[in-house]
Image (cartoon, rainbow, N blue to C red):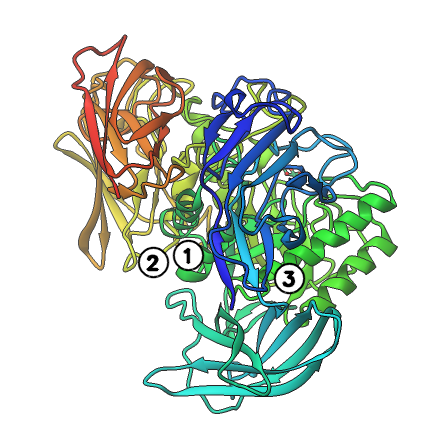
Amino acid sequence: MRSVIPFNRDWLYTPAQVSEDTPDSTFQAIDLPHTNIELPHHNFDNADYQFISTYRKHFRLPEPLNGRRLFIDFDGVMIAATVIVNGRRYGEHGGGYVPFSFDITDAIHPDGDNVITVLVDSTERPDIPPYGYVVDYLTFGGIYRDVSLRYVEPVHIDKVFVRTLDVLTAPRVEIDVWVKNHGDQARTVSLNAAVEYGEGAAIDGGAVVSVAAGAPQQYTLALSTGGSFRLWTLDQPERYAAFITLSDSADRQAALDEQEILFGFREAIFKDDGFYLNGEKLQLIGLNRHQTYPYIGAGAPARLQRKDADILKFELGLNLVRTSHYPQSPHFLDRCDEIGLLVFEEIPGWQFIGDSDWKALSLRDVQAMIERDRNHPSIILWGVRINESWDDEAFYKATNALAHQLDPTRQTGGVRYFMESQFLEDVFTFNDFSKGVRDPIHTPHLITEFNGHMFPTKTFDQEERQIEHAHRHALIQDLAFANPRVTGAIGWCAFDYNTHREFGSGDRICYHGVSDMFRLPKWAAFVYASQVEPAVRPVLHVLSLWTMGDRSEGGCDPLMIATNCDYVDIWAGDQQLGRFLPDRERYPHLPHAPITAHGGTQLGVWGKAYQDLRVVGYVNDQPAAEQRIAADGVPQRLELTADDDAIHADGSDMTRLVFRITDAFGNRLPFATAVIQFSIEGEGVLVGENPFPLVGGQAAVYVRAARQPGTIRVTAASLTAYKHLQPASVTIRVE
Ligand code: GAL
């Protein structure tokens, strides 16, 4: 039978290419996922992570082979890996965003000590997508995703694709199973599959097949009809498990292999007049996500990957994310399935197409992406062009044909930035940097980027810029809602990200996010957050610092408020300034238009005394949300919060610690600069800059669990300014 054993622990690492006889004592002990170098969150040189490093692991087989084959599975190594087992070298795998495996059975010492070495080349290899030219993001380096060992019988299940049909009328399931026979003769086996739908009820199907030796053979099992299934929807993303078993045909009890695949019943189609999920039209509203984080590059464990999906769905209120510009972590996609967040996933690349070998790798990426991810109900579209590249008819006909062959159930897109581009895909996915929304030439049409470099904005920019940033996101989403031929719009982008010197603000950050790189909101984030229905969560956020002299010429008129409330009352001290409605003139089509409150001198005058601001939002004439902003602007609190109460004692689990300097009502004070010093006790380490010179009023560090259970206690104190602020502490259990 199959066993899959996590292989993340107890690796040795050295940031150099060394030979196999280099002593262990020159390495450091690490656990995976791992970044080849921890960096400051900005102002580093992007050459810093570009080197070859060596990973080594000594191990004895965790289980006896008992005639089985043994594979090592890498979820992702940036950007090329050469694997050596007991001196036996396997070919180099090039490409940092897709998984790869080696059958290491013949190299292993079944009863003795083994050593595996992985040489990881994290330089910008021009022969491997996305490189060849510059790209506007950083790839970082290391064995940055999970590794596992997989034991399988010589005859085993290689791949599975669960396809649902007639989902809205009479749901059916067909399952493609690829069986690999590693022997030298054909073998007759029995293949069976079942999907349960409660109280022992199931649909099933099976076949007895003769599997030729050699390359994996494909079989399709049509399961019996008639099951009663709930749909996978955004509010109730119901999933089912398909159990696939492979057994000896003579002896059905002698199971050879077993796989459990989660999938969902949903129909997702882009049509000329809109996107339809389960037969209902849904306006897509999304943001682009890069997979990189401050300090740790791309080496983020499952918890942080899952948290990003939660932020996109539950904090930003999105229904779609684009995994710009590459396949992302399986943990991220699993979470999108679980919570009901749609995904547009695309192949690695950025504006550049290489030679024929490079294109062959890119086609390999199409295949690896789709074979890895086609069972995810959240994925609604495959991106099969290099982001924003020039037209290449033969190449893109090939990527589209391959995608359709590997997955006949999904449409393709391919992101371009010129309208005249040859339309070879099913959906015209277009980056619209026109500052408006261009009328589609081809349909279905999806806007896959806007804003971004057109208006970079920092959390510590002057308030007029931050307001304009929010307005631009509201405006383009509004125009996308207005045009019935536009299926939706995905803004650039969710989170600020590290980048090359050729882009960004010179400190290796593109400040293009509606949130900063710590995933903390700028004001534009509240434009998205406030598009959810108030019954889900009432949202009200004033897009102002409520200071009398930050804007040109002073005052706060007009006051913009991102909210899903029906109306707001605004008070300055005990004086009511008026009742204000959503600004339907500026944003006629958004589900929830921000409010533009014009109050003239009532909203402050340069140099005149003013009072605390209070804004109360009403839903169905009941108060539903409120925000207050102190007029005195005095830092009152240093806040420190952890995303999780408990993390795993596995040496690699992490959680985020957010810290902020706020006024008396909890509003961050973006111009309160202070050096924050952290102290940490217990079973974990701090990941991030310590001390941290805070700008923007908010930032984050992380803690990584040790391998011993216990607790971690972190305290933050303001070292320089604002000595009156009390230190803040959090305690996290390590379990
Ligand atoms: C696009 C590109 C993105 C990002 C963005 C910045 O052209 O696809 O990766 O660079 O510009 O606005």
Give the residue furthest to the top: 720
**Badge 2 vs badge 1, beta-carbon distance below 8 Å:** yes
- How much space separates mark 3 and mark 1, taking CA atoms? 37 Å
Looking at marks 3 and 1 on the same chain, the residue that comes earlier in the sequence is marked by: 3
Left or right, 692 with respect to 6, comes to left
Mark 1, Cα crowd under 10 Å, few <14 / some 14-19 / many 20+, is some
- Looking at the rendered structure, the kind of residue marked 1 is Pro
**SS at badge 3:** helix
Give x and y (percent) for residue 106. Answer: 67, 53
Give x and y (percent) for residue 151. Answer: 55, 60
Left or right, 6 with respect to 189, comes to left
Q: Is ligand 1 closer than 8 angstroms to the Cβ of mark 3?
A: no
**SS at badge 2:** loop
Residue at the spot of label 2: 533
Q: Residue at x 64, y 29 (%)?
A: 20
Which of 193/172 is in front? 193
- How much space separates mark 2 and mark 3, taking CA atoms? 36 Å
- Looking at the rendered structure, the kind of residue marked 3 is Glu
